[in-house]
Image: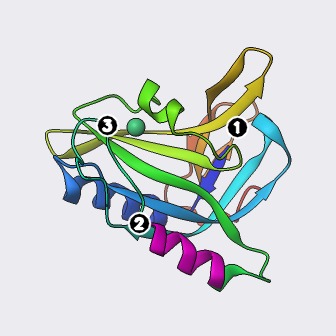
Amino acid sequence: MIVLEPAHLREIVSDCERAFPDEACGLLVGRTEGACAARAVHVAEVAKSANVAEDHRGERFEIDPALRLRLERTLRGTPRGVVGLYHSHPGGSAQASAADLERAWEPDLAWLIVSVLDGQAVQATANLIVNDAGGAYFAEVPLRTSNWRETGRGAPIEARGFDLPDPN
Ligand SMILES: [Zn+2]
């Protein structure tokens, strides 16, 4: 599960819409609780990146390595770290692609993927990398903003107008 503030999700969504038809990308800073596919990734900060890929259309993005380095340096010795990344799929679905999997060489990073159609973000997914006997693959996990809450039946509903604390 990825949990983030509504304002952070809006920030990501507007970055992805702004970049259209190119791919937007950035890093997620926060902390991780638990392990493997059951872990919860709590986002505390969104760090937008320039897309430094030579070809940023058609499934190509590359986060600025200088940004990553700068963040790692700033976060050293704090409880926070780089816990994930986001990027957009202009004209594509929000599901992780084969190209994404090829580049998912950091199993600890959560992937937030935003589908942007005609310049408008239409869907976002949260994905964690799972490594098992069958190899590595992306598992789609719940994406929650901190103002969502679980109902008794376990279905998530948005608590509009309420300022609920982080459910975790
Ligand atoms: Zn992708």
- Residue 4 or 113: which is nearer the viewer? 113
In terms of sequence position, does the residue under pointer 2 or pointer 3 come before the other? 3
Residue occupied by mark 2 = 64
Q: Is residue 113 left or right of residue 117?
A: right
Asked if the residue at label 3 sits under 8 Å from ligand 1, the reply is yes
Local packing at callout 1 (Cα closer than 10 Å; few below 14, some 14-19, many 20+) is few
Three-letter code, disc 2: Asp
Local packing at callout 3 (Cα closer than 10 Å; few below 14, some 14-19, many 20+) is some
Q: Secondary structure at mark 1?
A: loop
Distance from the alpha carbon under mark 1 to that under mark 3: 37 Å
Q: Which mark identifies residue 59?
A: 3
Three-letter code, disc 1: Thr
Q: Is residue 93 above or below residue 161?
A: above
Residue 33 rendering spot, x and y as whole percentages: 82, 54
Q: Residue at x 68, y 80 (%)?
A: 75
The magenta segment is: 65-73
In terms of sequence position, does the residue under pointer 1 or pointer 3 come before the other? 3
The residue at the far front in this view is: 54
Asked if the residue at label 2 sits under 8 Å from ligand 1, the reply is no
